[in-house]
Image: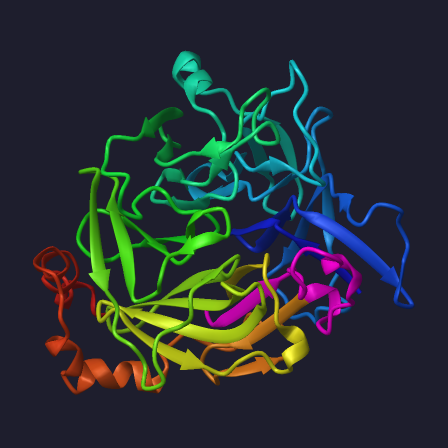
Amino acid sequence: GQMLTFASAVILGDYLYIDGGQISTLVDKEQTNDAESLEFSKTLVIPLNEPWKPGSVEIKEIAYKSDMRATNFAGLWADPKRNAIYRWAGELSRSARYKEGQENEMYMLSVDGSGDGTWSIKKPAQQAVFDKIIPSTHGESVFCDDLGFYIGGYIYDGSSYGESNRGSPGVRMYNASSSEWSNITNFDSSGPQGNIWNGAAVCLKGFGSTPLVMLLGGATRFEADHQPLTSVTIYNPITQKWYRQDTVKDTNGFPSEREYFCTAVAQGKNGTLEVYMFGGLSTKKTTLDDFWVLSLPAFKWFQLSSAPSPDAKRHGHKCVIAGDRQFISIGGIAKYRGGGFKSDDVWPRGIGIFDLVTSAWVDSYDPDLGDYDSPAKVQEIYKSGEADGYNYTPVIQELFWKNRSSNSR
């Protein structure tokens, strides 16, 4: 099997694009390359408009621009309005360091709609502003209504030339319609806001006129000071205000603290938003295989079925929801650090698929299975009125509940 870890993945149009990360190829359980994992200098493309099985799907490759390097933990942003994918920040793979004169540029992949495309450097509107923003790594990345975000993480000479190792609290924001950059660091850094490493950022749409960014999980230092999933942090990019909301536990409790997990968001039919979360690395450095969903506006956790075998546990993977209802997990590794690349993957090519409607792990992808619908147990808390009685802060009540009737479909 072949696996890619610490990569980035996004959907644009009919294709899934996977970029960066590290690869290791095992042949008959023996490694075929000298280095533990190889720098992977091309973008992989998987079709989403036709059915396939992970082991046999034809994966296209897009070559890098000549001076482009593979990065881990990069921000990868899909911009449907401009048929483009942007890549910024992250770190050189395989512990490489930037040399003098090398830049961690913003790159743009212009796609042609058939799974092919061309990488180029995307110049900012204001070069002087952009030059002052130092790319970080291990941060949280999301694209939300024309705005690309890379939040938190840390800086060192693997993310930008000549930099000393330090935390990088704050929000780096790219406006795709104006090509302008902002570096927002004016907030109380004692809270988790803007200072998260190895967690997740998701885009929340449909609650009022402004898109919101939600941060969950991760840690506030490198693999230490983990953030409990008993609450989430929400950022309003227009007002630049931060909010915190407690979550509601499932019958068997809250998800445990974790990093290097993956998330993907689905829009329910009744004005809800479901944030699916799979796997990750525990505070004890063991790899997880549990699968959860956080439903908004209730902010309640529900546990779903874990991976089909304990051997499918992983961290450093990425997830997307495609074909409206299929959750696809891409890459990742089972073991922490030492020898993590030496185990073969139980999933062909490291791709796992979960049908969100039948709530089952399946062995193939099919774009024509029908619409997404929230799990029955999720729908129940809204139908019964139970969710109305949860403890929301006044701001969350205003942002998420006041507008709810208008976006029930």
Q: Which corner quadrant of the image does residue 103 belong to? A: top right
Q: Position of residue 316 (x, y in %)?
A: 59, 56
Q: Residue at x 29, y 77 (%)?
A: 249
Looking at the image, can residue 298 be seen? Answer: yes
Q: Was residue 343 drawn as part of the magenta stretch in this picture?
A: yes
As drawn, is 206 to the left or to the right of 364?
Answer: left
Front position in the image: 371 or 134:
134
Q: Residue at x 72, y 56 (%)?
A: 338
Figure check: 187 above or below 7: above
Q: Position of residue 70 (x, y in %)?
A: 68, 37
Front position in the image: 339 or 159:
339
Front position in the image: 269 or 36:
36
Q: Residue at x 80, y 50 (%)?
A: 36
Instruction: Point out the stretch of residues depicted in magenta.
Output: 324-350
> How is the model colour-coded?
rainbow
Q: Residue at x 44, y 14 (%)?
A: 127
